[in-house]
Image (cartoon, rainbow, N blue to C red):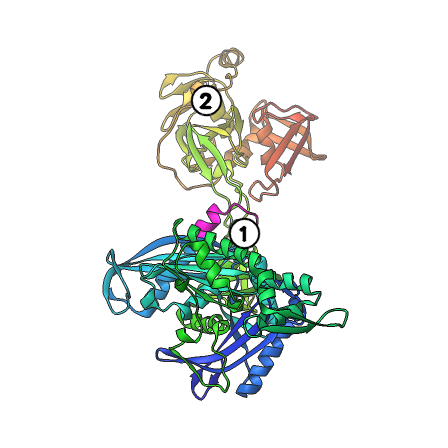
Amino acid sequence: MAAVEGRELVFGLDIGTRSIVGTVGYKDGTRFHVVAQREKEHETRAMLDGQIHDIGKVGTTIAEVKNLLEQDLGKKLTQVCIAAAGRVLRTVTTSVEYTYGMEKEIVSEDIYALDTMGVEQAYEEFTRDNDTDMQFYCVGYTAMRYYLNGYPIGNLEGHKARTAGVDLIATFLPDDVVDGLYKAVGVAGLQVANLTLEPIAAIQVAIPEKFRMLNLALVDVGAGTSDISITREGAITAYGMIPVAGDSLTDILVQHCLVDFETAEQIKRSIGAQETIEYTDIMGLPQTIGAGEAQELLRENIYSMTKEVADCIRELNGEKPVSAVFVVGGGGMIPGYTQALAEQLGIAKERVAIRGEDVMQAISFDVVNARKDSLMVTPIGICLSYYEQSNNFIFVAFNDQRVKLYDNGRLSVVEAAIAAGFPNENLFPKRGAAVEYTVDGKSHMIRGEQGEAAVITVNGQEGDIHTRIQNGDKVVLVPSTAGEAAHPLLEKLPEMAQQVHITVSGIQILLPRQAYVNGERQLGFYEIQNGDEIRIQNWYTVEQVAQYADIPLQGHILVNDAPAKADTKVYEGFDVRFEPGGDEEGESEELGSPEPASWEDLEEDNEEPDEDFSDPFRAQGNGAGSKQNRDEAAGTQDGIRQLQVAVNQQPVTLRGKKAYVFVDIFDFYEFDLGNSQGRSIVTLLNGRPAQHFEELHDGDDIKIYWTV
């Protein structure tokens, strides 16, 4: 608000169905000083039943009122307090309590925070129970009763408390009502500083707190709506509205007198002031009508209108009449209205009265020829509501989408994201797909990589989801990303790290553990798939040991000094010896080739993993298994032969052994197993999937490549 002579000015605007009334003033202690007031009627019926129908025309009229006030003040007005009529009004009554960490003295900020907590809870309850597709917003609230450490109290401020609570009534209206008001004042170049409900504003002036112990009703009769509020036991307990008011009476005079709406409105206003009313009909002919005749024309409609008001009062008051009714607003000034309402409620006619200047004892009018009748109650109340509660909406641009938010004083980016329907999962970084598998019957999971967090800027500056936002801010949010999916390799399993230590002919060698995936033996570069069942084998057969050590499987075989065969199992720490002797041909026939290991043969080894991922074959010294001895064996031992095969259409010669199996290819053909270029490796022998220990023959066609 603008400041005049050190005072903070409040601009209140009553946007009514028939006219717009602007009031500017300031509060000094308990008194409110009115320093300017202006009124202008709509030139057309741009509003009906409290609802804006033509935003542009209403905005133009608001601008005219604003300009007149600015001329009176010599100051620019940029912010305004407004009130909404109770069209399609919904209310929620709720209770909240806040517990402090330790006893503390309550200050005004604590009370505001408590009220805000109540409003937020009421909104959550309303959203949960709302049975329509319409979007509603809270346009006002009233604290019915406060609690100090569980006991009712009139004012929390200054008291020491461990807990503070409030019973609160919050009022909600549809988005189209609220949005229309904001757009109309925007046309006039104004921003909304506070939004309240018309009956909340009117009660600020019409029913002082000292009267609210009584069971009273306030009826604000405008042109299009009649807004109602109820007080009892020191609190405002209910709000309501009926979409019938003064314009329904004017419409009857339009038809009877054959005049335009403006002329009929002048006739209605003259009923209580003139015996005979003169006017000109639409034919241009001068006419007259007696005040009594006009009043009789309206009698039936007045009774119908007051019956609806009385029924609403009873409903809001627990199906009981109130003790007295105060009437404000221009529509209630028609002669006969208060008497008819008293009859409909069944109370004495003296207990239904129009409230005007008599309730403005705390108002100072620092303006010449100030208007002080019941029409000014609501505009002044709108100004006073600014001091009682801060209730407003803000608009922000979220990824170029216009978003409206209820301003609770601590809005951040995350509230804007929620209001815009931005998916919650796109706010936070996401992991790539995980892979779940079992190792020796135990479940394991490898998580994917963590993705990138959402990138947020507010007005071009870097922010996060907690960055505070204000009206007009521009928020840009780039969604978070998902990380790389998990691609675990068999050789990276901790269970595969521990090697098998055995001694072969006096030389200690290290053998990698063997893995079977879904029943098939796989090499270390196999990429584990979701759902794989993996068994780790911690033993070798004698024949497999001989293949790794490049030792011919012949002569006498001893395992731990006991005679053994090709399929004898060799475990950690075993000693294997190959000694010459016997019929080589018969011995080979006796040894034979072992059958593939069954699942029952695969045994669990719980030794701590060794993080050594070096070559699967290691030899200590220069024994039979060393690289030097293997090279020498290629040209010195009987039966050694060469094998010519094609690998990926390239000729490859295998040397140094009597027989060759498929995995021997990797000793003679350069293929980088450590640099993954896909999800798994395809191995084909003569066009079909190869077995790793399948024997090779001269002329075999082999293909090895990565696949995605």
Q: Which mark is residue 609?
A: none
* Residue in the image at 54% along x and 88% along y: 74
Check the picture and name the quadrant holding the C terminus: top right
Crowding near the residue tagged with mark 1, few <14, some 14–19, many ≥20 C-alpha atoms within 10 Å: some
Which one is earlier in the sequence, the residue at label 1 or at label 2? 1
Label 1, label 2: how far apart the Cα atoms are = 54 Å
> x, y percentage for residue 422?
56, 53
> x, y percentage for residue 27?
40, 79
Residue 688 magenta-drawn? no
Numbered marks: total? 2
Q: Which of label 1 and label 2 is nearer to you? A: 1
Q: Amino acid at mark 2?
A: Thr
Q: Amino acid at mark 1?
A: Asn
Q: Which residue is mark 2?
A: 541
Q: Which mark is residue 426?
A: 1
Local secondary structure at mark 1:
helix
The answer to whether 174 is drawn above or below residue 460 in the figure is: above
The answer to whether 571 is drawn above or below residue 648 in the figure is: above
- Farthest-out residue, right: 283
172 or 52: which is nearer to us? 52
Q: Is residue 476 visible?
A: no
Which stretch appears magenta? Answer: 124-134
327 or 381: which is nearer to us? 327
Q: Left of 437 or right of it: where is 639?
A: right
Crowding near the residue tagged with mark 2, few <14, some 14–19, many ≥20 C-alpha atoms within 10 Å: some
> x, y percentage for residue 494?
42, 38
* Residue in the image at 50% along x and 35% along y: 490
432 or 571: which is nearer to us? 432
> x, y percentage for residue 101?
26, 59
* Residue in the image at 47% along x and 78% along y: 372
Q: Is residue 612 visible?
A: yes
